[in-house]
Amino acid sequence: MTRNLLEESYPGIEFRSSSRNWWAWLKGVPPECVHLDHEQTWMTTLIPDTLYLRGKAAKRRQPARPEVSLCRECLVGVIGGELASYSGGVVAFEPDEGNCSQYFFVGAPDFAAAGLAPDVATAIEKRLQDNVTGCEECSRAATWLWLSRRQVASLDDVAAIGVAPGERLCAIHGATKFCDALAAIREANVFYMNLPYGDAGAYVWI
C-alpha cells in the first residue's frame, strides 16, 4: 500500500507510524489511527469497499480503499459523510452492543451469496420496496429504514422484519442515526465494517 493511497483515502486521519512500517505490513496489521495508542475499549476494522461472499473478498469499488483500524471518533468522521451522500435504499438493523463482531452492508443482489437466509432476504427486499415516504425528521424523501433492536432483536425474527415500523429517514438523518448508534456503544471490537454500494441493500450484524 502506498502512503499516498492511505492519505488520499482517509484525509485528516493520523495513523500510528508503528502500524505503517514494513513489520506491520509483514504481520498483516492494518494501519491504526493514533488514538488506538490509548483507546483500548473501542475499535473497528473498516474495509470500505470489500464485501465477503462465501468467504472470499469481492471488491465493490476500484480502486478499493485500504483496510484500517479506527477508534469511534475517527470511524464516525470517516463514514458519516459517505453514508449521508449515499442515494440508495437502506434497511439498517441496530446492532447488539454485546454480541456484534461484524457490521456490514450487503447490496440486495448479493443477499444470497453473502449468506442471508432466503426468508430473511425476501423480507428485507420487501421492505426495500415499501412505498417511499417522507423523512420523519425533515421534508426530504426517506431512503433509510432504521430498525431498532427493540423492534427486531435478530435476523432470525423474519416476522418482525416484515412488520416492524422502524424509523423512516432521509440519507442525512439515516447517517446520523447510524453514527449515533455506534457512539452509544460503550465497548466495541468490530472486526469488519464496510460502506454502502450499488442501488440498495441492508446493514446487518453478526
Image: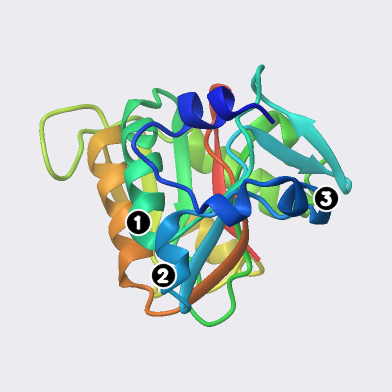
User: Residue at point 39% right, 75% down?
Assistant: 150
Which residue is nearer to you in this view: 189 or 9?
Answer: 9
| Residue 71 figure quarter | bottom left
Q: Which residue is mark 1?
A: 165
Residue under label 3, please give it.
26
Q: Amino acid at mark 2?
A: Gln
The C terminus, quarter of image: bottom right
Is there any visible trace of residue 206 in the rendered image? Answer: yes
Vertical arrangement, residue 38 with respect to residue 62, above or below: below
Question: Which is nearer the N-term, disc 1 or disc 2?
Answer: 2
Q: Which amino acid, mark 3?
A: Leu
Q: Which mark is residue 143?
A: none
Q: Residues within 10 Å of mark 1 (few under 14, many from 20)?
A: few
Q: Residue at x 76, y 53 (%)?
A: 23
| Secondary-structure class at tag 1 | loop
Name the one closer to the observer, 107 or 123: 107
Q: Which residue is mark 2?
A: 151
